[in-house]
Image (cartoon, rainbow, N blue to C red):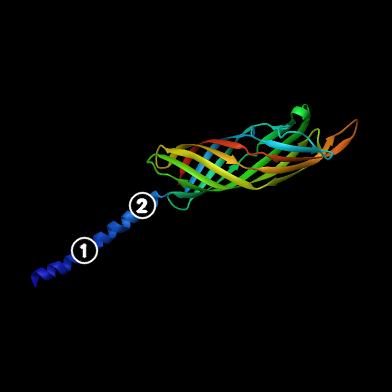
Amino acid sequence: MKDLRVFDYKLPYYSILLIFWINASVASGQSAFKRWSIQPSLIHIDLSAARTSVNIGGSDLMGRDNMSFTNSTTFGIVIDFYLTKNISLNSVLAVPPTTAVSGKHSLAGAEAGKLRYGSWPLALMYHFDLKQLKPFVGVGINYTMIFKVEEQDIKDIKIDPKPGPVLRGGLDYMITQRFGISASVQKFYAKANITGLAPAGPGGTAPSVVEGNLNPWIWTFAGVIRF
């Protein structure tokens, strides 16, 4: 009976230690899981892949390379909210860049104007865990907004941007659990219809319609802050 009393006395003691150890382990694991990643970023937008079809006064111009859009570099913040340790929702907030639209080939010398625009992508990302190196891939949707139009040769410009898919890939290199660096590339499949009045003959204008597949490449270089 004496041995049983000793056993009965010590069992709650060891049980409490076991429960305390399990709770501490769970709390430690939860604290290590940081749901937010904020990435102050340098963002370069490459519009060299843009293709357009142009109609002026009811006549289609030959080719799909009659207009060019200048590239831009801006600053922004890439944001990830982690649903799990490997899956996140990703978006970007950036200073709206500007692109100048010019004519090429049969429209050489024409300056359509300048556009200040912003893109709002939302993507679902998968992050691989290779210790400090964390590659990621994802897919989502993007909507482009036009904030300002500076008209030049084409007047009464109206722009109707369309939502399109986004592909994104890159990698984070974590120097510590909280801080790291990142590089990524995104492919936007962006379309826009642009209408206006183009010069036609001495002092005259003609309605113009531009259907653009802008499809920019977005290159991002950033610092990473996890919390």
Q: Nearer the viewer, residue 47 or 95?
A: 47
Residue labelled with disc 1: 13
Spot occupied by residue 18 in the image (x, y as percentages of width and height): 25, 60
Q: Left or right: 103 with respect to 30? A: right
Residue ranking furthest to the left: 2
The quarter of the picture where residue 188 lies is: top right
User: In the rendered view, would you say 105 is above or below 40?
Assistant: above
Q: Nearer the viewer, residue 175 or 135?
A: 135
Q: Quadrant of residue 19?
A: bottom left
Report how far apart the C-alphas of labels 1 and 2 lie in the structure: 25 Å
Helix, strand or loop for disc 2: helix
The disc placed on residue 29 is 2
Q: Position of residue 116 (x, y in %)?
A: 70, 38
19 or 141: nearer the viewer: 141
For this orientation, the residue located farthest to the bottom is 1
Is residue 156 visible in the rendered image? The answer is: no
Q: Quadrant of residue 45?
A: top right
Asked if disc 1 and disc 2 are in contact, CB closer than 8 Å, the reply is no
Where, quadrant-wise, is the N terminus in this rendering? Answer: bottom left
Few, some or many residues within 10 Å of mark 2 (<14, 14–19, 20+): few
Q: Position of residue 174 (x, y in %)?
A: 42, 39
* Camera-side mark, 1 or 2: 2
Q: Residue at x 38, y 41 (%)?
A: 130
Q: How many marks?
A: 2
Residue 160's tag is none
Q: Residue at x 87, y 36 (%)?
A: 205
Name the residue type under label 1. Answer: Tyr
Q: Where does the image place residue 105, in percent across and percent down from the top left?
A: 75, 27
Q: Amino acid at mark 2?
A: Gly
The numbered mark, 1 or 2, whose residue comes first in the sequence reads: 1
